[in-house]
Amino acid sequence: MTQIQATTPAETKAIEEMLTASGYSKTAINYYIDKPNMGLISDAEITSEMTGTCGDTMGIYIKMDNGVVGDAKYQVMGCAGAISAAMAVVDLIKGKDLDYARSIDDGVVFKALQEIPVKKHHCIQLAVKTLHKALDAHRLQKTA
Ligand code: FES
């Protein structure tokens, strides 16, 4: 569960080179470095947390707006694969309804990331499972 923080352009470049050599696409690397959807939504209506077998942990926060996902964020304590997958999931579900969000699977996220190392495919699963856990809990709440 290591996160490398870049503080200078040279460090960012070094991280980019390292991740490229490891098999990450430019898209996945940008998600990891920019972390556009990282954070917390304190009044989120749909949330869940999950820890993978690797020990990495993430939480998802979804706020609805007129029947679609108005905003969503992940908090991720995890690897570059986990962070890039979580960031991609948010971009996939924003502005979409919950049926569409439910249809997101590992393959859809992998396609959005274009390429991440084979050893990191389980990181995509963690991001998707966290999303589905939140959606399942929300559905149960609504039918209770
Ligand atoms: Fe645990 Fe990537 S190694 S999610």
Image: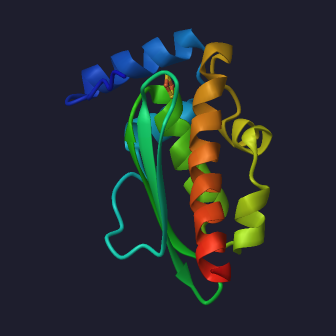
Question: For residue 117, which quarter of the picture?
Answer: top right
Question: For residue 39, which quarter of the picture?
Answer: bottom left
Q: In this view, does 69 lie above or below 135?
A: below
Taking the spot 56% from the left edge, 34% from the top edge, the residue there is 28
Number of marks in picture? 0
Classify residue 11 as left or right of residue 129.
left
Near-viewer residue (135 or 113): 135
Taking the spot 43% from the left edge, 43% from the top edge, the residue there is 58
Q: In this view, does 127 lie above or below 132?
A: above
Q: Where is residue 22 in the image (x, y as percent from the top left)?
A: 55, 11
Question: For residue 98, which quarter of the picture?
Answer: bottom right
Classify residue 109 as left or right of residue 31.
right
Near-viewer residue (97 or 34): 97
Classify residue 83 as left or right of residue 103.
left
Q: Residue furthest front?
A: 144
Q: Residue furthest left?
A: 7
Q: Where is residue 14 in the image (x, y as percent from the top left)?
A: 35, 16
Q: Residue furthest bottom?
A: 66
Q: Where is residue 105 in the image (x, y as percent from the top left)?
A: 76, 46
Camera sees residue 63: yes
- Colour approach in the figure: rainbow
Taking the spot 36% from the left edge, 76% from the top edge, the residue there is 43
Q: Where is residue 20 in the image (x, y as percent from the top left)?
A: 54, 17
State the quadrant of the C terminus: bottom right
Taking the spot 49% from the left edge, 41% from the top edge, the residue there is 31
Classify residue 26 as left or right of residue 19.
right
Camera sees residue 27: no
State the quadrant of the N terminus: top left
Q: In this view, does 103 lie above or below 94?
A: above
